[in-house]
Amino acid sequence: MARKGDYYPLNDYSIKGDYAALHFINKKREELEILVDMAVLDYLIKINHHWRATYRKKTDSYYAQTILHNQKLIEQYKTRTPYLHKIVLEADASQNQYVHHKNHNTLDNRISNLEVTTNENNSKDRNGQNKNNTSGYRNVCWNKNVEMWMVQLQIDGENTRLGYFDDVHEAGKFAERMRKKYYGKYAGKNRV
């Protein structure tokens, strides 16, 4: 039986062609995999730490994270509990560097799926609408004052109203076009 503070070695893993999958079981007893490139696997074997999935309610996603026991590594990564995607791309949040998972699978930490971006851009590229959304479309809500569907986006840090519509589907299409216009490759998806 493991005790608090016990050290766990690197997870079991399997080779899947040009990448590897680290295996683990989360608190819900689900088997999950963390995907990494072979070069990253070599580094993980060298530092020999166990990786787990930390659930973040805000993003409704799991992220690969470890607990470091080596003081040099703690100083290098400026934390005792680094995220794997930040290690892979050497991202520094104090420099406004955030890591974006292009395919939205936050356990896919292969270099081809990661890019350094700003927090603002990373926040724009989401799957679907907010949980309290009633329209079924991102950036579309019912405005009681005018009794119409309203499209609004965050543009340059400001909540900006872009139009009002009688039809929710027209509002949804317009919102998608506006996200592409203002957010570019970070436009994300309209519906899940």
Image (tube, grey):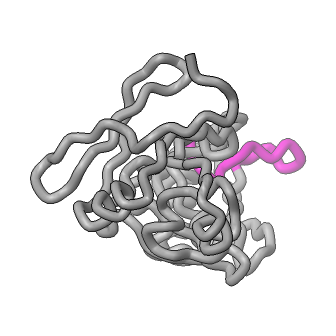
Quadrant for the N terminus in the image: top right
The residue sitting at 77% across, 75% down in the picture is: 157
Q: Is residue 140 found inside the magenta-colored segment of the image?
A: yes
Left or right: 101 in relation to 40: right
Residue lying at the far bottom of the rendered structure: 95
From this view, report whether residue 166 is shown above or below residue 18. above
The residue sitting at 31% across, 36% down in the picture is: 12
The residue sitting at 75% across, 66% down in the picture is: 161
Q: Quadrant of residue 55?
A: top right
Is 8 in front, or is 96?
8
Disc count in the image? 0
Is residue 35 visible to us here?
A: yes
Q: Position of residue 61 (x, y in %)?
A: 55, 41
Left or right: 20 in relation to 117: left
Q: Position of residue 131 (x, y in %)?
A: 67, 36
From this view, report whether residue 43 is shown above or below residue 24. below
Q: Is residue 182 found inside the magenta-colored segment of the image?
A: no
Is 48 in front, or is 154?
48
Is 143 in front, or is 127?
127
Is 103 in front, or is 154?
103
From this view, report whether residue 58 is shown above or below residue 120. above
Is residue 136 visible to us here?
A: no
The residue sitting at 30% across, 68% down in the picture is: 112
Q: Position of residue 121 (x, y in %)?
A: 59, 72
From this view, report whether residue 20 is shown above or below residue 27. below
Residue lying at the far right of the rendered structure: 145
Magenta region: 137-149
Residue lying at the far left of the rendered structure: 17
Q: Position of residue 51 (x, y in %)?
A: 48, 44
